[in-house]
Image (cartoon, rainbow, N blue to C red):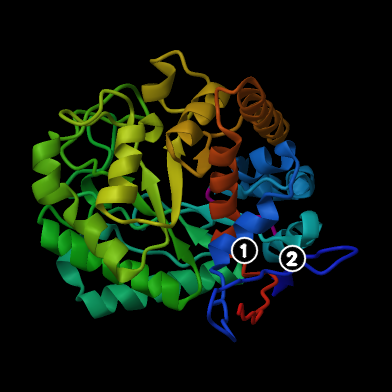
Amino acid sequence: MRGWRVLGSTLVVASLVIGASSTSLSAPSNLSCASAVVSTWPLSRMANETITVSVNALDIGAMAPAARAGYGGLLLLGSTAPNKFAGIVATLQRETPERYIMLVMTDQEGGGVERLTNLVAALPWAQTMGKNLTAAQITAEGRRVGLSMRAAGVNTDLAPVLDVDGRAVEPGATNPDGYRSFSGVPSFAARDGVAFLDGLRQAGVTSVVKHFPGLGGSTGNTDYGPAATLPWTTLKRNGLIPFKDAITDGATAVMVSNATVPGLSSLPSSISPVVMQVLRQQLGFSGLIVTDSLGAGALSALHLAIPAASVRAIEAGADLVLAGSPESSAASLQLAQQTSLAIQSAVTSGALARSTLETAASQVLASENQISCPIATSSTTLG
């Protein structure tokens, strides 16, 4: 466990209670310890922690600058990985500041959405699993694929899809889900999605449930352009059920979609404060909020480049921002730097509160790191 290093003195947390003696403080949470650490960081370090760098898995060796810069995560794309991939990732993790663990993530949903196929176990489409496997068997599948991910050095799966969509079609420009969804029945989608989440958790892999507040029945695929979910009144009755159940089950990360929500928000959900407030306040989610790719057509249609969209997302309440497929590893690193500079500039100008950025960076740090921070007790009696 990495500790919070305090040089030159010992930090003491004191409690002064009138008329009482031997008052002990309860242990702080991992997130509060992460917040204490992040509060000491320079602005550039905070900004970097909220950014994910996209990379083709074959170019993973080019990500040493990303590790040394302290970016919060790597998003692995591509269908194959190089030899000794796990060893390269382990080397990168040793390059990070204070060796804090980066989120190394990919989309391993099953069926046609799979990465690193030469290293990570294959899965059927989610809909195929939902129709043919019991919840216990889906958990076993999640554990199986999770163990192969961990062995490859991948600690985060951008799955399961919790959208409610029973259409038996491959995802495309008109439907982002189809086979990616476990079921068109909310209770079944919830049961099977949570089962898959449980399997990943048993394997030690963080699952990022998606795409909040639910893309089932949306007007199109936000990768290609603007799209809207079903009306908010409908989502509240049906689409939110799998997300509520996953949060109750202990989901620690949620991906927010780029779709607008009729009756709730005219902005893409990934940059909508209202959608973030629903997730935090109404659903009581206290974990990591991840954006869908901010390079999607739904954002570019608003003339928002990825750096500007990232600022908007963090201001709205997101913690970790994702970009799209890079043209090259060098282009991806350059985009990450541009995004970081945009976030820093927003804080400096007052457009983005430093406390908001600090909260986001703390969530990212705490998501894959156990932080120890000092705690002390004091006993004081006043006459």
* Image disc number at residue 4: 2
Based on the picture, tell me whether residue 90 belongs to the magenta stretch: no
Mark 1 = which residue? 33
Residue at 12% in and 33% down: 231
Majority secondary structure in the magenta region = loop
Determine whether 355 is above or below 185 in the image: above
Dot 1 lies on which element? helix
The one of 212 and 374 positioned closer to us in this rendering: 374
Mark 2, other Cα within 10 Å: few <14 / some 14–19 / many ≥20: some
Give the residue at the far top of this rendering: 303
Location of residue 98 by image quarter: bottom right
Residue drawn at (67%, 24%), measured in percent from left and top? 348
- Determine whether, in the image, residue 162 is placed left or right of residue 236: right
What span is colored magenta in the figure?
79-83
Tell me the CA gap for discs 2 and 1: 8 Å
Q: Amino acid at mark 2?
A: Trp
Asked whether disc 2 touches disc 1, contact meaning CB atoms under 8 Å apart, the reply is: yes
Name the one closer to the observer, 298 or 290: 290
Q: Is residue 116 left or right of residue 195?
A: right
Q: Earlier in the sequence, mark 2 or mark 1?
A: 2
Residue 360 visible in the displayed image: yes
Residue 193 visible, this orientation: no
